Amino acid sequence: MSELDEYHQNLMADISREADASGVLMVEAFFDRMAERIMEAGELETADRAFFQTGAGSQRMRVDGYAGDPRESDGVLGLIVCDFVDRDDVQTFGKADVRPIFNPLIRFLKRARKEEFRDSLSEVSPAFQLSDLIITTWQQITRIKLILISNRIYIGRDDNLKLDEPDGIPITWSVWDLARFERFDRAGQAREDMLIDFQNDFGSPLPALKASQSGVALESYLAIIPGQQLAAIYDRWGARLLEANVRSFLQARAKTNKGIQKTLKEEPDLFFPYNNGLSAIADGVSCVRTADGLAIASISNLQIVNGAQTTGTIHAGLKSANEQLSQVFVQMKLTVVPPDRSEDIVPKISEYANTQNKVNAADFFSNHPFHIRIEQFSRSVIFTAREGERHDSKWFYERSRGQFINARGQLTPAQQKKFDLEFPKAQLFSKTDLAKFEYSAAGYPHIVSRGAQKNFAEFAKEIGEAWSKSDTKYDELWYRRLIAKAIIFRKLEAEVPKQPWYEGGYRANIVTYAMAKVFHDANGEKQALDLDAIWRRQSVPEALQRALLLAAAEAHEVITRPPSGVRNMSEWAKQQACWNGLKGRKLDYAEDFDSCLTLVETARGTRRAARASEVMTEGINAQTEAVSLGAGFWNTVMNWGRSERKLTPKDMQILQICASIPRRIPTDFQAKHAMDLLARLRDLGFEGGPHQ
């Protein structure tokens, strides 16, 4: 069986289990799972399900989802259609099949622009709300992006298919097929190759200076790119240029920098001296010699690591300041980075290039210490088997896409069975999952509802700032309580679609709102939700389930019955006012809800005990390591530190003890001080002895 066949088999099994557990159709489970992938890959910032299908043949219309309000995505209207085949064997489709799949979506778009079509639908239906959104925002829409997601393999070779363009608004389309999803799940590589051909597609080659010597590990170039050229490139490729920017991590769709806008419109000739320019990476660069010297003819897979605001503002200038763009030039520092080194190199480029923000995009790449620590906990912390099950297990944290599938794929069939018992597929979670669990519990369901990437950006900013101040909070107990939140979140996901009041749609919004409501009502000055009981049992107590579903019913009421004048419920759920509406409602929980609570002081006592145990373990480990390094090594450290005048009297006292091993043995506290001192001296230039 090929890797692709195995991926298809596992995917269909997962979708079937999800559909059965939640009581939804397989195509809906497929949409939910794959929408997460296309958001994580940066194809779309958000993806809300809005299924509608009617008619047959040339009258058939269909839509499965959309990418939020176009006014929040530079005027781009994103629409999604599913091509799902419930077959055990892998199917294929070609270029000739694309038009018949997209045409019903385009028919829906054309009809959805008409008020009589909208008014013929129920106001609570997602199709009504999508139609109303299209009518409301049509004048602001500058581009239409169609996404086809399929569990078949696309065997087409090009994307030259032209689709009908309503009112002359350009349409671009993209196919996410089984093979592309498999590449993304296995290695985080979902993008098709993106070749920017300056010579043939964007006017002329890009004059450049080579800023690296021949034979070095990384090639670098300095270039000046005309504003019109940059705007045209972004107009074609859009957010794909910013994927290495962690979906514009710090931008979080913030208002474009007004200073950049002002310079562009009023002083375009000063744009170059005022602007910091772009830092970019690429897989490859092709150069040519011109009469004026070296020039870049094409760039493979260009990624703008820093400069998202600059790029977005210049692109907006196509409409707001087109005449001024001819006077705008931007400096670009371009580094050619092999794909296998991007995870190490890109965060550093972003961190060192970006001096404008307190917390950098680099701070939350997958190799940030926070993610590494959570990954370490996930591989070592064992949870007791649930009642009725035989095996203890762990939760697998995937800090980089593909870790789970690759770790399992390297094993023999017998080892895979053992792996599946140790790390059940249902206990796999990613960075964006973690952010959903945490922000739902923390009372930010409106932010969670804005989509995985926007939610992650907000969460990452908060955690990044907290981590820079102190990382001690994020210990094993914090991790165990995170898993308790994951258990609650996923239990709600499975139970909400089974409820008699559930009408279909908005499940993701209802889940995060219900969880936020129960945490808000439970956590007070004296009492709090007993998360420790949940991770110990690895299940949600029945009393808590009833409370969560009571909150879910109320969340459904608040979300699907917005205030007068608000028609789009998905967009309503993204507003602080929606959360305020649910937060302020009083719910009559059953008397047994109190059994789900614990005294705040008890929870704090558990944390203090856990921290004391951790400190003791750290001390023992430090003592063991200090003793193993030996007296001779510590004597060398002491002599270097003394000669460089880097030691305090306390440092000298402890180093003298370490230099007397084994006659004198440092205490746990002294050993930890010695190891911390060693790390500090190495930062200052000490190079002796073994390195970590």
Image (cartoon, rainbow, N blue to C red):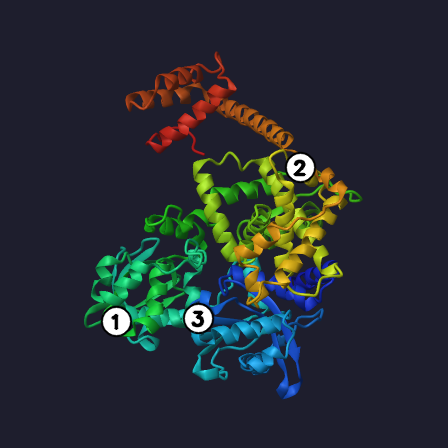
Earlier-in-chain disc, 3 versus 2 = 3
Pinpoint residue 526: horizontal percent, then vertical percent: 63, 33
For the residues labelled 3 and 1, the Cα–Cα distance comes to 21 Å
Residue 614 as seen in the image, left or right of residue 652: right
Outermost residue to the bottom:
58
The reply to whether residue 659 is visible in this rendering is yes
In-front residue for pair 148/540: 540
Earlier-in-chain disc, 3 versus 1 = 3
Assign the N terminus to one quadrant of the image: bottom right
User: Mark 1–mark 2 contact, CB under 8 Å?
Assistant: no
Quadrant in the rendering for residue 381: top right
Pinpoint residue 545: horizontal percent, then vertical percent: 73, 48
For the residues labelled 1 and 2, the Cα–Cα distance comes to 61 Å
For the residues labelled 3 and 2, the Cα–Cα distance comes to 46 Å
Read off the residue under disc 1. Answer: 324
Quadrant in the rendering for residue 16: bottom right
Outermost residue to the right:
388
Read off the residue under disc 2. Answer: 532
Q: Is residue 221 above or below residue 127?
A: above
Read off the residue under disc 3. Answer: 75
| Amino acid found under the numbered disc labelled 2 | Asp
Which residue is at 69% across, 41% downward? 534
